[in-house]
Amino acid sequence: MNLINPEEQNENGLSPELGKEKPELTSEKVNDSLVNNETAEEKDSSDSPNEMSFNEVLLERDEFLNLLQSVKADFDNYKKQTKKRITETRTSARGEIVEKLLPVLDACDAAVAHGAEDVVAIRKSLIDSLENEGLKLVGTVLEKFDPSMHEAVSHEPGDEEEEEQVVSEVLRQGYFWEGKILRPAMVKVRG
């Protein structure tokens, strides 16, 4: 805003620089302009994007709360799935190791069957340590035949009194690991 020196004004109230008449301010004009300015400020403040009503703030808060709860639930599910996958992977890896040891156990069984008494202690120690980790032996004499756990290699007739098929001889030991059959037992079935 350019301020005009009163000495520079000419007789008509014109500024020599601007050549325009200086408007006179009356009390009515001042009051009208103040009222107009206050109304404009009120409109600006209500239209301002920073100003929100209480209900809008509550709605936004609820929206953020719902979003937070959803993200938290997703993260909890992710943690559970990851933990489950890790457990399954460990169980599977341990099962693979035990499966690789099965030929060693078969060799021990064959040695014991041929009369090598020194191997009995080694076999027992190996079986005991694996049983502590979850290994179970499948296939014992006189147990009920189950095709999901036994592989019938031969069959012999049974007594008329026996209604069920039973294992009469175990030819190769079977193994169960963590609820899954690693290898079915090769058996001779009677009945």
Image (cartoon, rainbow, N blue to C red):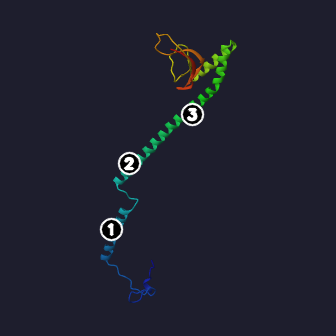
Mark before the other along the chain sequence, 3 or 2:
2
Q: Secondary structure at mark 3?
A: helix
Q: CA distance from mark 1 to mark 2?
A: 33 Å
**179, 62: nearer the viewer:** 179
Please name the residue that numbered disc 2 is placed on.
62
* Residue picked out by circle 1: 39
Residue 81 on image: x %, y %: 50, 37
- Residue 177 position in % (x across, y down): 56, 25
Q: Nearer the viewer, residue 23 or 128?
A: 128
Is disc 1 in contact with disc 2, using a CB cutoff of under 8 Å?
no
* Residue that badge 3 annotates: 89
Q: Is residue 184 above or below residue 28?
A: above
What separation in Å lies between label 3 and label 2 (alpha carbons)? 40 Å
Residue most extreme to the bottom? 11
Q: Residue 50: x and y, percent?
A: 41, 59
Q: Is residue 73 visible?
A: yes
